Image: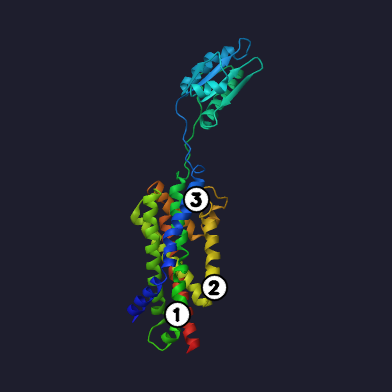
Amino acid sequence: MIRYLIKNNFKIMFRNPVNILLYVLCPILISAFLISAFSSLMASYEAPGEFEVGYTVQADSPYAGAVTALDSVGKENGITFNRYDGGTPEELMQSHELGGFITFTAEGYTIYESKSRKAEGAKLEYMISAVYNGMISGDVSDLEIPTESPEVAPAVNATDYYGLVYMVYFGWCAIVCAAGLFAQEKKHQILDRFRISDLSSARIYFGRAIPIVTVVSIGIGLAAVISAALLGVHWGNILISGMLLLLSIIAATSFEMMIYEITHSMIATIILSFGIVWWMGYIGGTFETYMFSAWSESVKLISPLYHTNRALVELSSTGHSDYILSSVIFLGAITVICSLIAIFAGSIRRKDRA
């Protein structure tokens, strides 16, 4: 009997292809829009390599005697200083592709930086400041620009980030795909027919859940493949990433079916589930990347989307993640608890109708 129910529910869902198509097109379109909007913001910082800097120096400049020391320190730090006696700093920087320019005058010195080469300008400014402080202390020998390599979140570009997290987010909107199914049940009073059958509440629950999970997974899976091919989204470990995405869809379906069994209203279910999922996404990095988010880590950990988002993003950027286990535990707990509550609520409802 349950196989007949699953088969029938599949037929009902495939009669509403628009809902299914949403799971293919919407993640791709929204991801593409956000990738285009935030690609420059999330571009990885690259430390400048060796580059050239131009300078002019007036005879009466108090810094004239420090040019030799400046040239020596610059070479040790990957900066070559070239003297120019004619032309404006802007023209010389453009024509000779300089990373910066310095003018030493009687009043002091002025640093010119290229707007398109800000990292090089920042390095130059720091070095000049360090040399100036060394002149005051009388020691400019063995001057090095200090660098540190702290452990930070792995670098990830906008393509991979938004291409991954919106697959998770739309997976959590699984209830939309079931709208036609629940509408047909009410229209044809299918639940009243179940009441006189030997189907238990658990079988009715799984008869709905299996088609919903399958159809949503097909839609999200197609969207993931298309986004990888057209947008260049990297999924890292495909097997683990696919497993996490599937578990996320199962947990979302269980959660939203629980709300439906309690409210027995599709409108109330959509409003409640979308409101809760939106907040979980907001906290978990769907709309603002979790790397830049001001939410504390303790708050982020409340959201199941955060665990899944972070696991997928880190799998894409580094090939491993410490959030895989927490994501599996979180999603598994949601699935089990919400399924039990949904089955219990359905059983109570059937008894009330009997």
Up the image or down, 133 lies above or below 220; here it is above
Residue at the image position 51 percent from the left and 73 percent from the top: 259
Instruction: Find numbered disc 2 in the image and state the secondary structure of the residue it sits on.
Output: helix
Instruction: Find numbered disc 3 in the image and state the secondary structure of the residue it sits on.
Output: helix
Residues tagged 3 and 2 counted as in contact (Cβ below 8 A): no
Whether residue 302 appears in this view of the structure is no
Q: Which one is nearer the viewer's eye here, 287 or 132?
A: 287
Look at mark 2 in the image and give the residue it sits on. Answer: 267
Residue type at the position of mark 3: Leu
Look at mark 3 in the image and give the residue it sits on. Answer: 34
Q: Position of residue 98 (x, y in %)?
A: 50, 23
Precedes in sequence: disc 3 or disc 1? 3
Q: CA distance from mark 1 to mark 2?
A: 15 Å
Q: CA distance from mark 3 to mark 1?
A: 38 Å
Precedes in sequence: disc 1 or disc 2? 1
Look at mark 1 in the image and give the residue it sits on. Answer: 185
Residue at the image position 49 percent from the left and 88 percent from the top: 353
Residues tagged 1 and 2 counted as in contact (Cβ below 8 A): no
Q: CA distance from mark 3 to mark 2?
A: 29 Å
